[in-house]
Image (cartoon, rainbow, N blue to C red):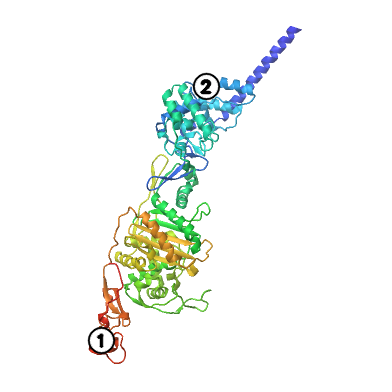
């Protein structure tokens, strides 16, 4: 009976054994069947961070979604870090074939003692398999799949290839994947330059990236570093002296690298990002590892950000403005050197350089004056600044079809030259000039120079009632600075793919927009805006030209100015269109422009503007419009610049006789007491050529 029972138990045990064996084999085959093909690693392209560089080679941004990664070959990874990882994560890496059976036995015993999975024995190859193909959930099924994949990987790839893939995949905290990104994040250097102490610190993070981050838990990170150094010492990967020196080395971390990319030139980066996505799509931009080289000058950008922040903070309340923007370009290339789209990107991502459409006010007037110069009208042409009613199309502001504009200073100045009218930004002469040259030609000039926004055809056009953005009008002024040549603004010079192959190169395209001499004449006139006009607060110790602008009820204030190698536009105002103190146009914008340019041009050579040709300076009588005669009163004499064709042939025939002696009326004084007007000092209208 006992014998039969024993035979029954043996048979039952064998049946259970074979059933379990079959079940295990079935599970094993099912797992193997569902596992991915490791040969896919040959074509595997890991998600890689796109880098954006400034013109001076600094990293402005790292664009990525979940994984911030830069892939580098094993030869560009510090040997210290390679050894630190092997000593800590997989000491038998070069001896096993994917599985470390001694480590598995040790971990299994420990897990059975604790009754749960408390320790793994994953090799570097197993970790790579898990990172690439599996979840991180701790189950025996996943561990089995991990082991099978590890053995397949070992058969397919060399140890060096496996280690390279692992070191480019491993997570090292703060959204940093791979050693190159981690080296930059923690120490501001490349993986190739890591020393022993730094390598041990980073290798220690692998066990618990969030727990052992030196930015969050320096003490824990330091203990892990010591553990790694001891492991390296135990496996003879360093000597005792090296380990001790590394343990006491004071590490220099770069916590500033934890900042979001948009804290460095955020509005510019946003502008570049939009361009990249339009070209290549979001997937390529955030995962494709592009290398994007831009036009931004970090020194000029820092100066722009500092000046804008300082003026809004210190003077915004006084002049009642809460926002400001600045953009600066090289007019010869169109390269954007600095861009500040607002006071705080994190508070408002709206870019007031490229997205805000605002009325430019009087900063639009140079386009009208340029049209006049093209038609041969002289800078010294006299025009009457007096109360004038203009006939316009009826609208909500002028229902009766009449318009009586005023000047900025609420005054009228009588007969003035075009040069003077531009310098003082007088409205009436500008409207009369637009009437004379025609709205169509003025719009044509603006279009040729780069204004793309809608321009409403009407006399108010010269007062800047049609909205534009700061980038387009600043770029248009660059045509003046570049002797009449139009160059489109650009932010990107070159793009390489992840393999360093050039996939885009910007080509500077020049287009003649203005005659060279017309541009020179306009520069000559606009220099007067800074010398003695509305832009006196922008004076630099070098030749510069500009125009101010303000809008109805002082909602916007502008200053667009340039030297031959740099054109810069400034805007201040409020997003809700609230009015400012009226003096912001002349008291704030020119000073922002000056303070920025003093820094931006510090190491730039002083370059003179080209001199205009064909202009002649003559003295004419304001009343007759002819050359001054001997009897013309001083207050009627003007020294002006005219095209040669406009120089009067005759002398004044209005002022004759004794009644034009100074200070006398009625009967002529004795000869000895007569003082002729012609003997008085003459007032001249200054100009620059």
- Asked whether 563 or 511 is in front, the reply is 563
- Which residue is at the far right? 1
In the picture provided, is 635 more to the left or to the right than 22? Answer: left
In the picture provided, is 467 more to the left or to the right than 419? Answer: right
Under tag 1, what secondary structure? Answer: loop
Please tell me how many numbered marks the rendered image carries. 2
Q: Which mark is residue 392?
A: none
- Which residue is at the far left? 672
Q: Quadrant of the N terminus?
A: top right
Q: Which mark is residue 100?
A: 2
Label 1 – label 2 distance at C-alpha: 118 Å
Q: Quadrant of residue 242?
A: top left
State the residue at coordinates (49%, 55%): 343
The answer to whether one can see residue 295 in this image is no
The answer to whether one can see residue 602 in this image is yes
Q: Residues within 10 Å of mark 2 (few under 14, many from 20)?
A: many
Residue 576 lies, with reference to residue 182, above or below; the image says below
Residue 5 lies, with reference to residue 296, above or below; the image says above
Residue 280 lies, with reference to residue 651, above or below; the image says above
Residue 528 in the image, given as x and y percentages of width and height = 34, 68
Looking at the rendered image, the disc whose residue lies closer to the viewer, 1 or 2, is: 1
Q: Earlier in the sequence, mark 1 or mark 2?
A: 2
Tell whether label 2 touches label 1 (CB within 8 Å). no
- Asked whether 455 or 414 is in front, the reply is 414
Residue 305 in the image, given as x and y percentages of width and height = 44, 53
Residue 522 in the image, given as x and y percentages of width and height = 33, 67
State the residue at coordinates (52%, 54%): 348
Under tag 2, what secondary structure? Answer: loop
Q: Quadrant of the C terminus?
A: bottom left
Q: Residues within 10 Å of mark 1 (few under 14, many from 20)?
A: some
Give the labeled residue for mark 1: 674
Residue 444 in the image, given as x and y percentages of width and height = 39, 67
């Amino acid at each position: 009976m006992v014998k039969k029972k024993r035979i029954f138990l043996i048979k039952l045990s064998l049946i259970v054994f074979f059933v379990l064996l079959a079940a295990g084999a079935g599970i094993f085959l099912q797992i193997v069947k569902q596992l991915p093909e490791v040969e896919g690693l040959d074509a595997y392209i890991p998600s890689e961070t796109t880098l954006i560089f400034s013109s001076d080679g600094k990293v402005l941004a790292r664009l990525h979604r979940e994984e911030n990664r830069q892939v580098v070959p094993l030869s560009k990874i510090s040997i210290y870090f390679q050894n630190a990882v092997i000593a800590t994560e997989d000491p038998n890496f070069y001896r096993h074939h994917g599985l470390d059976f001694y480590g598995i036995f040790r971990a299994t015993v420990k897990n059975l003692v604790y009754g749960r999975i408390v320790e793994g024995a994953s090799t570097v190859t197993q970790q790579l398999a898990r990172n690439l193909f599996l979840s991180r959930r701790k189950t025996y099924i996943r561990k089995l799949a991990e082991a099978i994949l590890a053995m397949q990987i070992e058969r397919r790839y060399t140890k060096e290839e496996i280690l390279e893939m692992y070191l480019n995949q491993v997570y090292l905290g703060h959204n940093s994947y791979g050693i190159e990104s981690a080296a930059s994040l923690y120490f501001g250097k490349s993986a190739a330059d890591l020393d022993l102490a730094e390598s041990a610190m980073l290798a220690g993070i692998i066990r618990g990236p969030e727990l052992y981050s030196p930015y969050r838990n320096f003490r824990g990170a330091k203990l892990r570093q010591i553990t790694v150094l001891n492991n390296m010492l135990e496996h003879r990967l360093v000597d005792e002296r090296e380990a001790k020196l590394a343990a006491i080395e004071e590490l220099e971390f770069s916590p500033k690298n934890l900042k979001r990319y948009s804290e460095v030139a955020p509005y510019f980066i946003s502008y570049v990002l939009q361009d990249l996505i339009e070209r290549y799509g979001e997937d390529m931009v955030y995962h494709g590892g592009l290398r994007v080289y831009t036009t931004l000058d970090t020194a000029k950008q820092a100066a722009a950000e500092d000046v804008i922040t300082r003026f809004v903070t210190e003077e915004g309340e006084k002049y009642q403005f809460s926002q400001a923007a600045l953009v600066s370009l090289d007019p010869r290339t169109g390269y954007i050197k600095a861009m500040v789209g607002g006071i705080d990107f994190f508070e408002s991502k709206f870019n007031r350089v490229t997205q805000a459409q605002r009325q430019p006010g009087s900063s639009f007037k140079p386009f009208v004056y340029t049209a006049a110069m093209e038609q041969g009208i002289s800078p010294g042409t006299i025009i009457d600044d007096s109360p004038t009613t203009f006939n316009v199309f009826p609208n909500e502001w002028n229902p009766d079809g009449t318009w009586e504009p005023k000047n900025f200073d609420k005054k009228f100045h009588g007969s003035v030259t075009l040069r003077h009218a531009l310098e003082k930004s007088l409205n009436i002469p500008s409207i009369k000039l637009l009437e004379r040259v025609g709205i169509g030609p003025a719009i044509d000039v603006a279009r040729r120079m780069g204004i793309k926004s809608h321009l409403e055809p009407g006399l108010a056009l010269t007062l800047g009632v049609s909205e534009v953005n700061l980038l387009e009008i600043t770029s248009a002024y660059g045509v003046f600075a570049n002797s009449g040549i139009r160059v489109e603004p650009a932010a990107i010079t070159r793009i390489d793919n992840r393999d360093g192959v050039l996939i885009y190169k910007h080509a500077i395209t020049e287009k003649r927009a203005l005659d060279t001499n017309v541009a020179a004449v306009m520069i000559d006139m606009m220099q007067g805006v800074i010398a003695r006009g509305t832009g006196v607060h922008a004076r630099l110790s070098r030749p510069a030209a500009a125009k101010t602008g303000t809008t109805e009820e002082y909602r916007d204030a502008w200053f667009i100015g340039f030297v031959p190698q740099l054109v810069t536009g400034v805007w201040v105002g409020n997003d809700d269109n609230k009015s400012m103190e009226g003096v912001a146009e002349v008291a704030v914008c020119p000073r922002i422009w000056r303070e920025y340019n003093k820094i931006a041009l510090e190491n730039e050579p002083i370059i003179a503007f080209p001199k205009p040709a064909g202009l002649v300076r003559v003295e004419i009588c304001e009343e007759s419009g002819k050359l001054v005669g001997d009897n013309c009163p001083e207050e009627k004499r003007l020294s002006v610049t005219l095209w040669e064709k406009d120089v009067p042939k005759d002398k004044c025939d209005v002022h004759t006789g004794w009644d034009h002696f100074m200070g006398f009326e009625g009967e002529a004084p004795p000869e000895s007491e007569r003082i002729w007007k012609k003997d008085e000092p003459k007032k001249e209208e200054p100009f620059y050529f």
